[in-house]
Amino acid sequence: MNKVILIILAIFLPPVAVFFHKGIGKDFFINILLSLIFFIPGVIHALWLVTR
């Protein structure tokens, strides 16, 4: 998927961006947990994974 689209998804829907980039795995579940606790850590985690 295009990196720009993944970055936009990471800002608005972090778990979806992680799913498209990495698939279902530990990173996906970590991101869901971070997004449920508070939205900003989920965004940071997703941006870190997508741009890494």
Image: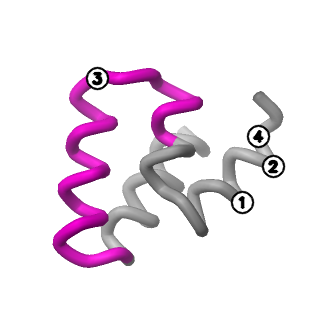
Res. 52 mark? none
**Residue under circle 4?**
3
The magenta-colored residue range is 18-39
Q: Are marks 2 and 1 in contact (CB under 8 Å)?
A: yes
**Residue under circle 2?**
4
**Mark 4 vs mark 3: in front:** 3
- Position of residue 19 measured from the top left corner of the image (x, y, whole percent): 48, 33
- Position of residue 43 measured from the top left corner of the image (x, y, whole percent): 45, 65
Magenta stretch contains residue 30: yes
What's under tag 4, amino acid-wise?
Lys
Spatial separation of the CA atoms under disc 3 and disc 1 = 21 Å
Spatial separation of the CA atoms under disc 4 and disc 2 = 4 Å
Q: Residues within 10 Å of mark 3 (few under 14, many from 20)?
A: few
Q: Are marks 4 and 2 in contact (CB under 8 Å)?
A: yes
Say which residue appears at 45% left-offset and 22% top-offset: 23
What's under tag 1, amino acid-wise?
Ile
Res. 8 mark? 1
Where disc 1 sits, the SS reads helix
Say which residue appears at 32% left-offset and 36% top-offset: 28
What's under tag 2, amino acid-wise?
Val
Which of these two is toward me, 36 or 4?
36
Spatial separation of the CA atoms under disc 3 and disc 2 = 22 Å
Where disc 4 sits, the SS reads helix
Corner quadrant of residue 38: bottom left
**Relative to 25, does residue 4 appear above or below in the rendering?**
below
Mark before the other along the chain sequence, 4 or 3:
4
Mark before the other along the chain sequence, 3 or 1:
1
Mark before the other along the chain sequence, 3 or 2:
2
**Residue under circle 3?**
25
